[in-house]
Amino acid sequence: MISFEGQSWIILPLILPLAAGLFCFLSRRWAFALSLTAALGNLLSIGVLLNQFLDTGPLTYNVGNWKTPLGIALRIDGPSILMLLMTAVTGLGITLYARGYFAFRIAVPKRIGRHERQERFFWPLWMTLWASLNGLFLSADIFNMYVTLELISIPAVALAALSGKPASQIAAFRYLLVSLLGSLSYLLGVVFVYKTYGVLDLVLLSGKTASGAGMAALALMSVGLLLKTALFPMHFWLPPAHANALAPVSAILSSLVVKGSFYLLFRLWFDVFASAVTEPMVNILGTLGAGAIVWGALQAIRQKRLKLLVAYSTVSQLGYLFIAFPLAYLDMGTHWGTVAFMVLAHACAKSAMFMASGTIFLHAGHDRINDLAGVRSYIPVTVFAYAIAGVNIMGLPPSGGFIAKWLLISSSINSSQWWWGIIVMIGSLLASVYIFRVVSRFFVIPEGYKVPDRRPHSPLLEWPALVLALIALLLGLIAPYPLHILETGNSLFSMVSPKGLPL
Amino acid sequence: MITNLLYSFGGLMLFSMGLFALIACSHPLRKILAINVMATGVFLILIATAYRQIGTGEIDPVPQAMVLTGIVVSVSVTALALILACRVQETSNHSLIQRKKDDFTRTGT
Amino acid sequence: MNAHGWLLVCILLSSFLPGIVIFALPEEKTGLRTTLNLCGSVMKIVLIMVMNIGIFSGRIYEISLPVIPGVVLLLNADPLSALFSTLSSVLWLLTTIYAVGYLEDSPNRSHFFGYFSLCVTVTIGIALAGNLVTFLLFYEMLTLTTYPLIIHRGTEKALRAGRNYLIYTFCGGGLFLFAVVWLQTITGPASFTTTGFSSVLLESHRTQLAAIFLMLIAGVGVKAAIVPFHGWLPQAMVAPAPVSALLHAVAVVKAGAFGIIRIVLDVYGVENLSRLRLLPYLNIAAAITVLWGSIMALQQDDLKRRLAFSTVSQVSYIALGISLVDQPFAVIGGLVHLVHQGLMKITLFFCAGNLAETLGIHRISEMKGVARRMPLTMAAFSIGALGMIGIPPTVGFVSKWYLGLGGLAAGNWLLIAVLAVSSLLNAFYFLPILTQAWFGTQTAPWPEERSFGRFETRLSLLLPPLITAVIVIVLGTLANAQFSPLTWVNFIIRGYGL
């Protein structure tokens, strides 16, 4: 007897998308309706959980009443509920967009069969992926996190290959190999942890003192996760995989999937192994992050295709997340705040950008940046969405990206590491170059431009991107709420671990 | 204790050999096999940890559960990798070994 | 926060909402669009007048939104914001009327007027910002909303100008952001006050505060077009005339100058700055800009480019006056020039636009005898030009008079010399235009003449410059009247205890 009192709500984010995914295999006709129901139900249950969480603090739930270590525990604290919320909102947007996207493609007379097949496989894969992502954020121990990481990889790779083009399949194969290598490295780290400490639970682990084997474990797990997060110079697989996928898939991969492994990495470094982390370690990650910001942005500036530009922009933006490591190390207390804003804003903005690029591709038939002039005349909403998302990526106020940038710079000055702040500034200047390279084309309507015959499309193709971009833009104005959530949640770890000492 | 160490060391060896093969070999099938060898290495270490207290006959059940889960994951992932490798061979008309560079930069929706 | 604070929000919304609606309007709904625009701008003026009266009677307008610890968005109207927002809103109404006429049959008007409204919204936001973070917010948004206006024509040249504009302003904005964050880590989240931050901090953080001051000034100096950050301005002349008028007289350049005023008076404060001894540098930079702009203007044949360099020169009068911050007369001269320069420069740009739109005249060498064809336009132009030179009874004279008094009182001979030389240069580059236009004889047919019936040009193009020209004269003669800019500036500086 399942009662939906209290903490049982915690399993809904797992069950709903998973069930929807399974049923989607059975019926193509109901696939979208099922997925939408799951997405809405998921949003609702996360709302309820958020409410409970704000009342009572972190929640734990033992599945089937089995106690750890053999049972599986689910847990929610501040960062994890924020990640769940991010996935729920972005995921809902992507679900709606995907409907418009596939409907538009299926309406093309040629190759209907192929497009229908793509849609048929998209829904179950996407729902499974969603369930796995939620699973990752809910997991309370590092082994379950390994399982969810693998469960994320499988549908993610399948989705990346969905477009059926050779380029996308080669990219997907490479993505799979990198992802497996990352998972195995992580798993080896988990084994070391278990060998050394005999526990897997995150909170219990955070109470242990660091040892040599523990450091080796952290190193192995980190390398694996860095591969999956595509930190420079391990980013080589990301641009082809993200740029060659179907537009809704690119949005999923870029805005959600890389965030999963990053979330886990940040958790390990600052909540679980906080006592083991040393300054040279965080500086290495910071340096790689700085490399990612500059390299990714320079590559984005060089691209001729819109989707590749957006994909390289992801490489660059992920760099900011790693700049946060050295800053969080010396300026404790703000660490989740900075990262949370970065992640939330980037998830919304980047998915909006990929959706907009997809719509542009569908309508214009290509995504050559230099030939995009005039697009504004027939898909103005999409162009607007792209521009607003760009404001976020550049980190201009009042966007969430701005808040993140502000926090990064202010903690870089507070902890006397101003050079990270300068890198952040350089990064956003470079970002404005690649954003405006595209946006300036949008604003222009060449003389004598004839608006091409516009194929009708559902509003779902345009509006989800705009709404997500606006959410990212206005995130700066509602900043106190995410911070409040984080403050409620951080207590879980600070009770146990000896970290949190400022300088 | 010696046995335990031996297993762990063997597992590490397997893991490193697999890693080497994954990087060095270019054939997709070999890469998939290399991944499997690495996974086996990890499982070997894991199963060795279960054998904790010699003499008492008590065996830690947690690593065993983990290995079982790991094997299931590994099998399904291998299946996915194989089907993907086959698909690449079919659609691209040339094997992964001699792929052209521009295949990686071409975009599509 | 108080109930009056919502008035400030309404002031912002009065142009923001029309802007959003205009974006959604189809291209051919000209009537509705114009009505919306005019209603919005009239409403804004009315609201700002209500605010001004409130401020004068000592009411406090303030509304805030906390964002993250240390970052609060704060709107707060003080007499200085009233000065700038009144100027912007009045000139916006006139520019809107002008733009409606100017763009009567050009494409993409929804797009244009949408951004036009947003641009004014953020300019007013800059005026009403109550702390540096809020100022920064609107300052960056100003860049974004003016960019589409600059590249409105969509030509390669326009795109290049837009790109340069972005490079300059984003670099400036980045520097500004860094400085603001840095300042906040030292002073804490401070809103604008008449005394600046606590002078105790000066003991412990002297070098940092000096560095931050220079970064802040450089950051806003980009928009204020202080040499060497002025490169974008002449290029931005490719924009349509109403945009140039707006950029030069109301929005961008003025936002930069206003930023300098805010930083000097409200962030650092008179006392702190005189102890830091940094203002002489600002003084010299402004002096160089004044002279450089004038010299460059002399060499231009393109009318709009000459006006652009003249802007570079004239806006730095404001910085020049502010840099002598302990001399009340100089500060009065600088502050009042914020308004006066706006009025004169917008007149000149309107007239330049009329010449281009009616006769196709873009170059000064084509202007021989043009006053006979367009007497009213050229009359307005002449008033603006004489004002720039500083001839009484125009407002330009009032500004220069006070600046000169301030320079004398401070014994700052540099300022006096700069004033004299630049007035001379102003005369050199404006008087030939006037003599040619009035007394020259037409040698070649007008490049591209269009006829507009009864008047010399379209009425909506003719009225705005005439109105501003009349204001230039009236405010010059009645400078001491109740509610003239000069009186208001006196009211402002009383608040600073000068």
Image (cartoon, coloured by chain):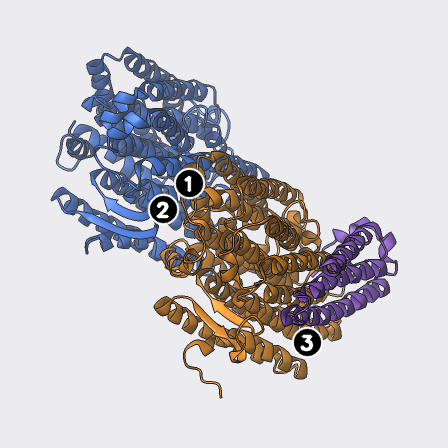
Q: Quadrant of the C terminus of chain C?
A: top left
Secondary structure at numbered mark 1: loop
Which chain does tag 3 point to?
A
Q: Foreground residue, C311 or A236? A: A236
Instruction: Name the residue that disc number 3 marks.
Output: A120
Q: Position of residue A437 (x, y in %)?
A: 59, 44
Q: Position of residue C142 (x, y in %)?
A: 41, 43
Chain that the image shows in blue: C
Q: Is residue A50 in sight in this rendering?
A: yes
Residue C54 position (above or below residue C389): below
> Which amino acid type is shown beneath numbered disc 1?
Leu
Chain A as rendered: colour = orange
Please tell me how crowded label 3 is: few (under 14), some (14-19), or many (20+) other residues with Cα within 10 Å.
Answer: many
Q: Is residue C149 in sight in this rendering?
A: no
Evaluate if marks 1 and 3 touch, with contact meaning CB atoms under 8 Å apart.
no
Secondary structure at numbered mark 2: helix
Q: Residue at x 64, y 67 (%)?
A: A147
> Which amino acid type is shown beneath numbered disc 2?
Val
Evaluate if marks 2 and 3 touch, with contact meaning CB atoms under 8 Å apart.
no
Q: Of the residues tagged 1 and 3, which is closer to the observer? A: 1
The span from disc 2 to disc 3 (Cα, nearest Å) is 47 Å
> Which amino acid type is shown beneath numbered disc 3?
Arg
Q: Position of residue B53 (x, y in %)?
A: 65, 66
Image disc number at residue C122: 2
Secondary structure at numbered mark 3: helix
Q: Are marks 2 and 3 on the same chain?
A: no
Q: Residue at x 20, y 48 (%)?
A: C61
The span from disc 2 to disc 1 (Cα, nearest Å) is 40 Å
Q: Are marks 2 and 1 on the same chain?
A: no
The span from disc 1 to disc 3 (Cα, nearest Å) is 54 Å
